[in-house]
Image (tube, helix red, strand yellow):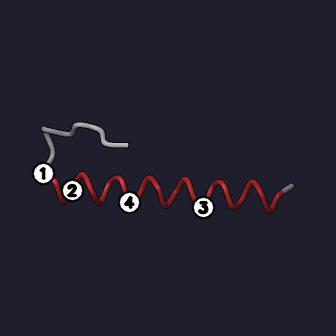
Amino acid sequence: MTTSRSSLPGELGRLIDEFVAHKQALGYRYRVEAD
């Protein structure tokens, strides 16, 4: 899953990807526990 972020520095893009993945993981876990 590689998205081209040519406008952003590699490290910043990686941090954003990590943050988004973390939020998605938290949201998924929250939905699972809520059931």
Q: Which residue is mark 2?
A: 12
> Which residue is at a point 22% across and 37% down the rendered structure image?
4
- Mark with earlier residue (4, 2): 2
Q: Looking at the rendering, in which quadrant would you find the C terminus?
A: bottom right
- Mark with earlier residue (1, 4): 1
Name the spot of residue 18 as percent of width and height, x first: 38, 60
- Mark with earlier residue (3, 1): 1
Instruction: Say which element carries label 2.
Output: helix
> Which residue is at a point 24% across and 51% down the rendered structure image?
13
In the picture, measured across the screen, residue 9 lies left or right of residue 31, that is left
Kindly identify which numbered label has been placed on residue 9. Answer: 1
In the picture, measured across the screen, residue 11 lies left or right of residue 35, that is left
> Which residue is at a point 63% across and 55% down the rendered structure image?
27
Whole-angstrom CA distance, mark 3 to mark 1, is: 26 Å
Q: Looking at the rendering, in which quadrant would you find the N terminus?
A: top left
In the picture, measured across the screen, residue 28 lies left or right of residue 10, that is right
Amino acid type of disc 1? Pro
Whole-angstrom CA distance, mark 2 to mark 1, is: 5 Å
How many residues crowd mark 3 within 10 Å: few (<14), some (14–19), many (20+)?
few
> Which residue is at a point 31% across and 42% down the rendered structure image?
2
- Cβ–Cβ under 8 Å for marks 3 and 1: no
Name the spot of residue 8 as percent of width and height, x first: 15, 45
Amino acid type of disc 3? Leu
